[in-house]
Image (cartoon, helix red, strand yellow):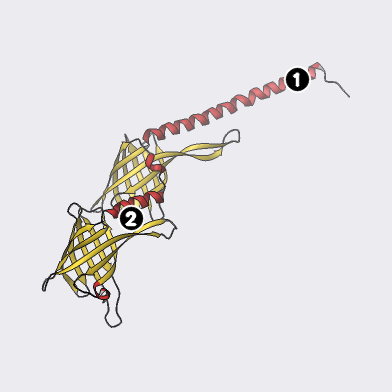
Amino acid sequence: MKKWTPIIALAISFQLMTTSCAFGPSENEAEKEELKDIEQLKNTYSAIQGEYKGEIVGNGRTIPVMAWLYWVLEPSTANSKGEKTFIPSLRMRYRQLDVIQRDQIGAVRFVSSSGDFLGTVSSTSAVTHFSGSLNQSNLNLTVVKNEGTLGRMTARRISADIQATSKNLEEDFFDRLKLAHQRVVGLYEGHVKPASGSVYPIQIEIKSFQRVSESGSLTLLLKAVYRRLDFPDPTVSERLMDASVRFELFPIEISLSSEGSASAIPNSYFLAIRGNLDEVSGVYKGEIFDRRGSQGRFEVLRKSN
């Protein structure tokens, strides 16, 4: 067995040292650059994160909106050492205030040097696209939905708080819907004044029911029962009705409707009640229709909720 001579050992030692010097510093520099880029993204996104409030103007409408910008860490490609890395990714949570629906969430892109901003957010029932700019805490965006351009959105950052982004979408939607329903549910009593004939007493009871949606989540549904109190037979005097409410209007608009036909009379069970609710006084008033047309004006007062 041959022994290593000092010259051979010295040569191997020198080769290992030169190899280490050749690759070590470059790997360290690459890693430092990666960490620097990640830190720069965090700083950029942290500077713009927060709650934005504004409106969309277009197609003859003005829609109040809210949005939250925040960032999360997402897995990326392996770094120079082959290790899995996580990089900041900018997110947007978007809400239209003219209707009560689930918030939309999606990835957005922001270029700090130019202020360019674009991205797409979605929920189970809607997709919305944004493109425009973010400068000095002001969003200025074109908003496009499936049906076409919605309008121009301008929104200003009102807070750096991003607490709302941690709320579960379904739970948040359910809570907001529940609060809205509380504004209209209750027992209303009053009268109908026909164009001709005598005034007659009526009762309208609006209720909120829990149900499971198609996606399997818990949601709420409004229903109403209409009663004509001068008819003793409930099969004639009562109607179970669907309820539709436009909470964004002032005063609130409530529309109730029922459909159906007896064998001999088409649309015999049709009834529509349309009116507005003054939340301060509790007065709900408007017009009532059946298959023959308008049956007069109604006015009822909320007695309980």
Give the labeled residue for mark 1.
11
Residue 171 is at least partly visible in this image: yes
Q: Measured from the top left, where is residue 47 in percent x and y?
A: 38, 33
191 with respect to 211 (left or right): left
In this view, 63 is above or below 115: below
Instruction: Name which residue type carries label 1.
Output: Ala
Most distant residue in the top direction: 6
Element under disc 2: strand
Q: Nearer the viewer, residue 150 or 250?
A: 250
Residue 261: which quarter of the image? bottom left
Furthest residue toward right: 1
Q: Compute the Cα span from label 2 to label 1.
A: 73 Å
- Type of the residue with mark 2: Gly
Q: Identify which residue is drawn at 29% across, 49% down.
A: 97
Q: Which residue is mark 2?
A: 148
Residue furthest to the front: 232
Q: Is residue 129 shown above or below 285?
A: above
